[in-house]
Image: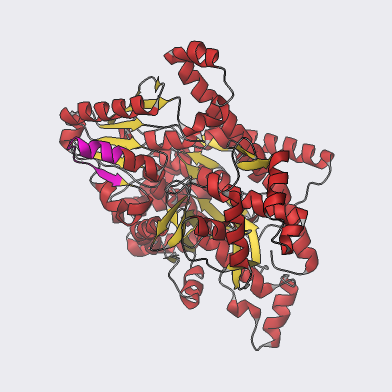
Amino acid sequence: MSDFFITKPVRFDQLYPEREEVQDDSLLDRCGTTASGWLDRSWRTRPSRVRAIVQQVAPFAAAVRDLDADGMQELARELARQLRREGLRDALVGQAFALVREAADRILGMRHFDVQLIGGRILLDGMVAEMETGEGKTLTATLPACTAALAGQIVHIITVNDYLVTRDHALMQPVYAALGITSAAVTSDMTHEQRQLAYACDVVYCTNKTVVFDYLRDRIVLGSQADTLHLRLEKLAGGNSRTDRLLLRGLGFAIVDEADSVLADEAGTPLIISAEVFSAGEAELALQAITLARQLAEGEHYRLLTGERRVEMTESGHQHVLDLCSSLGGVWAMTLRREELMLQALTALHLFRRDEHYLVRDGTIQVIDEFTGRVMADRSWGQGLHQLIELKEGCDITPRKEPLARISYQRFFRRYQHLSGMSGTAAEVAGELGSIYGLAVVRVPTNRPNQRVQQADRVFATDTEKWQEVVAAIQRHHVRGAPVLVGTRSVAASELLSDLLQARGVAHKVLNAKQDDAEAAIVAGAGQPGCITIATNMAGRGTDIKLAGAALAAGGLHVILSERHEAGRIDRQIAGRCARQGDPGHVETILSLQDALLAPYTDGLSGWFAARFLRSERWRSRWMHHAQRRTERSQSIMRHGLLKADRQMGSILSFSGRAE
């Protein structure tokens, strides 16, 4: 992943440019790739190198300031010619950044700070820029996007939802237009023809899900003969060429916003284009599985391994299921199929919880993204799990879906010729981003000193004590006029806290997957004096809470974390809602030893240990952090395993001639 185009002219001989995935099959290959990647990232992340951009831009500032609108476009055209001919030399990059900075200042009244210049150079060099909340990632992205577009690259700016796609593009489009750069936003409700027109632009804003599915649609069109020679011959022959039906123009330069969420948290998520498959016996089979699973007893017939999110049957359980289904016949007489069905049914019953992993809305099951807290209405679980959860909740069973094409985020993003990212919380997964994508993480200093005050964790013995203290803390800060944001892990927890406040007559707003349409409006008012907002981790991504003057005088936004998430980065994201751009702010953490994160690690603790060792507040907090780190490590190991399995699946599909 080290052969980036940062010093090379652009090639224009590929009809659908993308990076070929390298298979490091041998141990020697993997060690060599790891070592060379580490050396490359170490060289590119030198402070003197990434900060040099400020001095490289300075000599051009006065000259571009004297240009009129026509002069700016003429300079942009001249820079495009030089960049395509000579590559991204430092002097040309400095001049391009100066031009973009002047255009943003003149048109939007938003002049890039020096730290944003540094962030832009980090992105252009194929790295992840870790920037604090409120430091202007959206504006920063225009620097590498414009420069790469002038250099002839296909540029995709990728974020996590359609709202941010539309908002960010609408805000920054005048800057691109001022430099003669075309831009567009691609959203999920657009037609095929509208998408083609949008992807034809120089800079395209889209979500990670949208661009992956559009890529899979292209793979279905291209089939097994996707090389440039075949495509050129088709165009020469005339008629209905496959290139006329494609959506994307290739995978050139990607700037991934919220990179840790997209490239790490969702990395192993399979993206699948599928067709519905109707089978008369499937509904009856699923009903039988759920009915049988409900007759099994935990501990006697099965064990829940919540930390690994799986179920394990006991010997007694195997025999009991065999006895229960002895009269059913059919697939129930097949040992492997019988056990597979029972494990899926038990998983649906006990490991997937309503208002945490999914919502029931209008008689349908809607999946909740555990990392963003948002509903993914068009996503479903595979291998019959979705249908089992529908039965569990009394919903109509939808047809099972047969995959037509599939790929994971990991394999997809490794195919970009040039990959970079932005995030407020990437340091914790720096090793993973480096080993899987070849991405170095570089922290960008804040424009103003950070005034966030982080209070010590308080960990109570029970959930009841914790929620009582959360309510008391909310009321204390509300009385003094400070806006309060309370972060919860699940919809159910946010509604529980809402009920407690309602019982005390405390006015507040709730932001969770059930109110996702009202997200922007709720967040917009969350910085008013005395305002109380309860939110799942939806409030941790892509939103800025702007404080009113009286709220600043009251000490800024007060954030209360009521649970630790499986990834500490999500806690940092919610904490990052306060103290943005030098504002004051406080973060308070109120936890319980009954929190879901601790369940896999406390079930086996002796009563003596719980009574003695966890009596101390300090040791309770340490135990919580220990559980979080263990969970993060296990998830990272799992994602590496998924990448290996996904590569093997890709090889099988490629060999069989099917789309990925």
Q: Pick the residue in front: 103 or 276.
A: 276
- Determine if residue 86 is in view: no
Tell me if residue 30 comes above or below residue 594 in the rendering. below
Q: Pick the residue in front: 68 or 429.
A: 429
Question: Would you say 623 lies left or right of 64 here?
Answer: right
Toward which corner of the image does residue 559 lie, by quadrant? Answer: top left
Toward which corner of the image does residue 189 lie, by quadrant? Answer: bottom left
Reply yes or no: does residue 509 show up in magenta.
yes
How many numbered circles does the render carry? 0
Question: Would you say 543 lies left or right of 202 here?
Answer: left
Write the residue at 57% across / 20% down.
Answer: 605
Write the residue at 58% across / 66% down.
Answer: 283
Q: Pick the residue in front: 121 or 486.
A: 486
Reply yes or no: does residue 260 show up in magenta.
no
The quadrant in which the C terminus is found is bottom right
Q: Which residues are magenta?
A: 497-510
Give x and y (percent) for residue 108: 29, 54
Residue positioned most to the bottom:
239
Give x and y (percent) for residue 534: 30, 40
Give x and y (percent) for residue 147: 50, 54
- Determine if residue 342 is in view: yes
Tell me if residue 563 comes above or below residue 653 in the rendering. above
Write the residue at 28% across / 40% down.
Answer: 498
Colouring rule applied to residues: secondary structure
Give x and y (percent) for residue 23: 77, 50
